[in-house]
Image (tube, grey):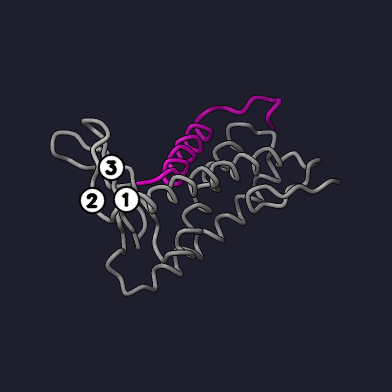
Amino acid sequence: LKAAFIGGFVLLRDEPMTKWLALSALIVAADQAAKHAVVQFFTANAAVAVAPFLNLVLVYNTGAAFSFLSDAAGWQRWLFIGIALIASAWIVFLLHRYPHQRRFALALALVLAGAVGNVIDRVRVGAVIDFLDFHAFGWHWPAFNVADSAITCGAFLLVWDALKPRQKAEV
């Protein structure tokens, strides 16, 4: 087996799950590049209108989705890192076991990318860097990032995969 190092992952080229881990690595790289650019060019909490429904805004989220536990004393950082690392290990195991179930493996790769992207933020800066602020009719969706989008798309695909019957070739 030949090994390759891509985006922090050591990949075995002959391993069927390699393409899924490579996809995760690419998404993590895109997420981190976008966050780096936002941190370099934006001031915290200052919104820049991009479209009538979209602002770019630098927000540091110490909590989870929808800022859950963001007002806690700091212990939540390590809790969320631990949960994400355990989930990531489980996802890699599932990718190894089911790499030929394309929809399921794609969903797992997306969730893995999002988890890793946000863990990197929590380790580096103590919070997740969010910057996409969608709004309509005076209502703002909580700011999010590329990693959050990957997790959301992956979760949607997991539900879709669970509801769709398996084809014989995928089993």
Most frequent secondary structure within the magenta stretch: helix
Depth check, mark 2 against mark 3: the one in front is: 2
Residue at the disc numbered 2: 46
Viewer-proximal residue among 22 and 42:
42
Cα gap from disc 1 to disc 2, whole angstroms: 7 Å
- Label 3 neighbourhood size at 10 Å, few (<14), some (14-19), many (20+)? many
Is label 1 in contact with label 2 (beta carbons under 8 Å)? Answer: yes
For marks 1 and 3, give the CA distance: 14 Å
Q: Amino acid at mark 1?
A: Phe
For discs 1 and 3, the disc positioned in front in the rendered view: 1
Task: Name the kind of residue labelled 2 in the image.
Answer: Ala
Region of the chain picked out in magenta, as a range: 144-171
Q: What separation in Å lies between label 2 and label 3 (alpha carbons)?
A: 11 Å
Q: At x 58% / y 54%, what residue is drawn?
A: 88
Residue at image position (68%, 40%) is 98
Residue of label 3: 133
